[in-house]
Image (cartoon, rainbow, N blue to C red):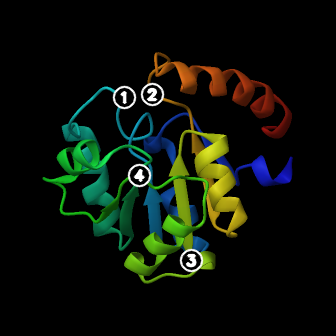
Amino acid sequence: MKILTPNYYYDSIYEVDLDLLKKNKIEGLIIDIDNTLVGWDTLLPTITVKEWLEKLVTLGFNICLVSNNNQKRVMYFSKELNIPFIYQARKPMKKNFLAAMEILETTNQRTAIIGDQIFTDVLGGNRLGLTTILVKPIKSKEFWWTNFVRKIERRVIKKVIK
């Protein structure tokens, strides 16, 4: 179960302890979009999300958005943000986590992943030794496959989150 256990677990991105990340020498943040930053059916970043991302940059974090979603969705979401992104990432596969770290110019010890899914974000990040941060999904209504996986995730969360 260790491979599925996040280093940190928060109710939302806004509760992530940025000072703790700085203290742990985290410089790069790989951030999921759907149900992490906004609901999976929200097309554009909200003003609050934009402000939070700007705060991260002001604090010196480098950011790369990494999503399993398609090019059109990720490009449309990201166009106003001026933040690099990777679409169709196929998380938890290592390839695009490594690509994101190359974009961020960081190592695994200096990179954290923030996402809402254990079997994509946390598993992928833990496989590479990243700091993994799990947040609760923003919306409960999702695609049928994700709803199925969430049922399994809830059982895992009860075992690994203490």
Say few, some or many: other residues with alpha carbon within 10 Å of mark 3 (under 14 / 14 to 19 / 20 or more): many
Q: Disc 4 to disc 2, how far (Cα)? A: 21 Å
N-terminal of the pair, mark 2 or mark 3, is 3
Identify the element where label 4 is drawn.
loop
The residue singled out by tag 1 in the image is 39
Do the CB atoms of the residues marked 2 and 3 lie less than 8 Å apart? no
Do the CB atoms of the residues marked 4 and 1 lie less than 8 Å apart? no
Residue 131, quarter of the rendered image: bottom right
Q: Where is residue 46 in the image (x, y as percent from the top left)?
A: 22, 36
Up-down relation of residue 153 to residue 37 (above or below): above
Question: Label 1 amino acid?
Answer: Gly
N-terminal of the pair, mark 4 or mark 2, is 4
Marks 3, 1: nearer the viewer: 1
Marks 4, 2: nearer the viewer: 4
Q: Residue 127 carries which label?
A: none
N-terminal of the pair, mark 4 or mark 3, is 4
- Residue plotted at (55% across, 27% down): 146
N-terminal of the pair, mark 4 or mark 1, is 1
Do the CB atoms of the residues marked 1 and 2 lie less than 8 Å apart? yes
N-terminal of the pair, mark 1 or mark 2, is 1
Q: Disc 4 to disc 1, how far (Cα)? A: 18 Å
Identify the element where label 2 is drawn.
loop
Q: Nearer the viewer, residue 36 or 69?
A: 69
The residue singled out by tag 4 in the image is 88
The residue singled out by tag 2 in the image is 138
Question: Label 2 amino acid?
Answer: Ile
- Residue plotted at (75% across, 33% down): 157
The residue singled out by tag 3 in the image is 110
